[in-house]
């Protein structure tokens, strides 16, 4: 799989049947968009989340999204064909510790990661296309300072990738929902809050097959469908994490046949959910 833009537009996790080792808050919350909904374990014992898909399907990615796992936590993803394990990632550390060359002694806390300052933590797993009936996620995080493990969303499905990456001019905006207001005494007050990303880019080079693939994908879910977007997959660090999030498409989808055997899709914009 290339390092070009990857999108998951059909989340196979949402209609799946789920079980979990413990549920202080239900594991079905990982199938809901709202940020107030999370799965929460009862304690720090190893947790296993098992999903049985509504129908057998091909899987190319699974993302643990909006989690609270610590820098030492490990996640193991097993893809299942009935009871047979057809792919096993092994136990993987999901948060990259800051390397000693970049670690700032006296500034960065011990165990800090490069993505600690981002409001959402995530752990993407990418696979070659594999036929599955379900999957199993095993989480180990005995050092979690929260005393419990939490996951907001799990995204699983096939990947839509354009033939060429986004053109230069990619724009990422962190939108802050807070507002400044003046009091009667002329003091500046800040009301509200919340921050979310808005990502815009152009796909300037597509042949007829690539255009058709993109059209089918976008028209299937419409603007209301959640899309996981990863602009720099598997590059690691802040570059990948900042440009990867769960979003919805803003504006209309359009393409232009601008010269022989080439189509372009301009001003694709995704707003974080």
Image (spheres, rainbow, N blue to C red):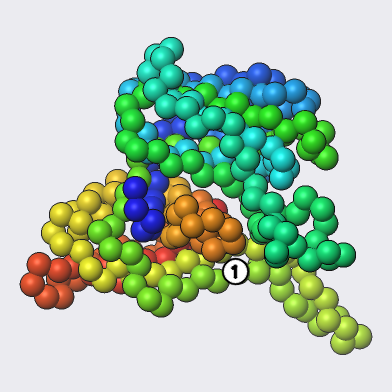
**Which residue occupies the extreme right position in the image?**
185
Q: Can you give x and y, in whole percent of width and height, for residue 188 in the image? A: 83, 81
Q: Is residue 3 above or below residue 133?
A: below
**Image quarter of residue 67:** top right
Instruction: State the residue in front, 154 or 90.
Output: 90
Q: Secondary structure at mark 1?
A: strand
> What percent of the width, then of the height, locates residue 147?
82, 33
Determine if residue 78 is in view.
Answer: yes
Crowding at mark 1 (Cα within 10 Å: few <14, some 14-19, many 20+):
few
Is 268 on the left or on the right of 194, as rendered? Answer: left
Residue placed furthest toward the left: 260
Q: Nearer the viewer, residue 62 or 10?
A: 62
Q: Is residue 82 above or below residue 244?
A: above
x and y, in percent, of residue 196 in the image? 60, 62
The picture places residue 117, in percent across and down from the top left corner, at 71, 60
Q: Quadrant of residue 262?
A: bottom left
Q: Residue at x 20, y 58 (%)?
A: 211
Task: Tell me what residue is drawn at x 42 percent, y 27 percent.
Answer: 87
Q: Which residue is mark 1?
A: 174
| 108, 208: nearer the viewer | 108
Q: Residue furthest front?
A: 101
Q: Residue at x 18, y 68 (%)?
A: 263
């Amino acid at each position: 799989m290339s390092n070009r833009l990857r999108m998951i537009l059909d989340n196979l996790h949402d209609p799946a049947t789920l079980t979990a080792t413990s549920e202080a808050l239900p594991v079905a919350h990982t199938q809901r968009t709202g940020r107030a909904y999370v799965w929460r374990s009862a304690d720090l014992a190893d947790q296993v989340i098992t999903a049985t898909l509504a129908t057998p399907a091909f899987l190319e990615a699974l993302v643990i999204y909006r989690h609270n796992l610590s820098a030492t936590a490990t996640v193991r993803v097993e893809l299942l064909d009935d009871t047979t394990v057809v792919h096993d990632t092994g136990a993987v550390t999901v948060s990259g510790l800051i390397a000693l060359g970049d670690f700032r002694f006296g500034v960065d806390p011990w165990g800090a990661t490069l993505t600690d300052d981002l409001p959402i933590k995530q752990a993407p797993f990418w696979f070659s296309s594999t036929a599955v009936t379900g999957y199993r996620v095993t989480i180990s995080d005995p050092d979690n300072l929260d005393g419990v493990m939490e996951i907001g969303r799990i995204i699983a499905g096939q990947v839509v990738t354009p033939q060429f990456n986004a053109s230069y001019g990619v724009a990422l905006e962190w939108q802050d929902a807070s507002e400044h207001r003046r009091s009667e005494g002329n003091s500046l007050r800040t009301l509200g809050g919340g921050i979310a990303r808005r990502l815009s880019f152009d796909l300037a080079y597509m042949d007829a097959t690539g255009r058709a693939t993109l059209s089918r994908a976008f028209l299937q879910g419409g603007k209301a469908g959640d899309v996981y977007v990863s602009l720099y997959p598997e590059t690691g660090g802040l570059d990948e994490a900042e440009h990867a999030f769960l979003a919805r498409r803003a504006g209309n989808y359009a393409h232009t046949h601008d010269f022989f055997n080439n189509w372009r899709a301009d001003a694709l914009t995704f707003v974080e959910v």
